[in-house]
Image (cartoon, helix red, strand yellow):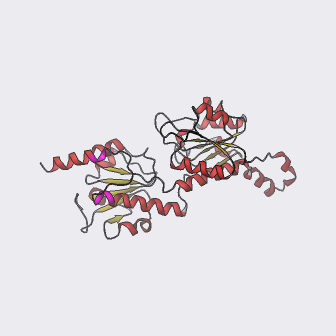
Amino acid sequence: MPGGEQVGDLPVVVALGSVDPGLVSGVLDGHCRFVAAPGEAELAAAEGAIARADARVDRALLGRAPALRVIARTGVGTDLIDVPAATARGIAVVVTPGAGAAAVAEGAIGMALHLVKRFGPLTALVREGRGAERAGVSVGDLDGATLGVIGYGRIGGRTAALAAAFGMRVLAYDPVSEPPANLRCASLGDLAARSDVITLHLPLNEQTRHLVDDAFLARVRPGAVLVNCGRGGLVDTGAAWRALTDGRLSGVGLDVFDPEPPEPHPLYSHPGVVLTPHLMGLSQRATAATFTAAARGVLDVLDGREPQAVADPAWHSHRTKEIHHDHR
């Protein structure tokens, strides 16, 4: 393995955030020395890094890791990684699409089911001995309802498939990856107006920040359910709160927040809201698959192979320029 400084004759790979060594040892053992809690010396020597979703990888951190060649993100969101700065250094930013897709999709449908079936309020009735009041809780159905999927990548597609198994009609909108013609909506407004449940699966960028705002929510069917398992910044929290309190939304499910961890907001204490701390993609099976994929991505780059998925394919050309410059 060509590269920078090595410790113990093996390239150093560090954790950025909490990484259980047992989840990556099956791939890295014998090839790299994995450091779960790196100090400055290990960071300076590191050729690879495995970064959790909450790990900020900015120019300052990159400057402390001069030998770094690859960062593997456990997931696909790179909003906390300075990808342009990494690419300019010839550092590959590996992502792990697909590893947690099924788990996130199950989480999105699970939240929708929880909200449509009103499990939260009904549980409260039973616990508080108010079962006789059950007629005051309107319970809905997924069967025959319409799901609007915003973002039709791996997770969005899997969510659509699960919804179809429940007997739901599916609509989809994606500004980048065009959904199948039989599902495609021409606009966000069209999807909002025709959907009983809306799920979000887009990355966060300047175009998608607060995609769900007052204007969007003014178009939804009265009593619609909104589920966000994408990125917290896709939803204007205040707008969601207003829509929930005035009846435009009957329920909100959130696995993601802006910021994370979330700051106090009245939305989060509403009985029509279900919350999880950004872990729908971290089921036991999905976690093992995600960390294995991240470790393989690190090893691929260090061994000179093309990784399966990267945030910016241009890293390779910058890396080539850097190698040529170093050998002048």
Residue at 80% from the left image edge and 56% from the top image edge: 126
Q: Is residue 238 above or below residue 94?
A: above
Quarter-of-image position of residue 230? top right
Q: Position of residue 251 (x, y in %)?
A: 69, 43
Residue 186 vs residue 140: left or right? Answer: left
Residue at 19% from the left image edge and 50% from the top image edge: 323
Any part of residue 15 in sight? yes
Quarter-of-image position of residue 39? bottom left
Magenta part of the chain = 300-316
Q: Going by the picture, which residue comes out furthest to the bottom?
A: 30
Front position in the image: 52 or 150: 150
Residue 29 vs residue 221: left or right? Answer: left
Q: Position of residue 221 (x, y in %)?
A: 70, 35
Does residue 257 belong to the magenta stretch? no
Q: Main secondary structure of the magenta part?
A: loop
Q: Is residue 59 above or below residue 307?
A: above
Q: Going by the picture, which residue comes out furthest to the front?
A: 182
Does residue 302 belong to the magenta stretch? yes
Residue 248 vs residue 233: left or right? Answer: right
Q: Position of residue 174 (x, y in %)?
A: 52, 38
Q: Going by the picture, which residue comes out furthest to the left?
A: 328
Q: Is residue 104 above or below residue 204?
A: below
Q: Number of labelled discs?
A: 0
Which image quarter is the N terminus in?
bottom left
Q: Position of residue 154 (x, y in %)?
A: 51, 49
Front position in the image: 202 or 185: 185
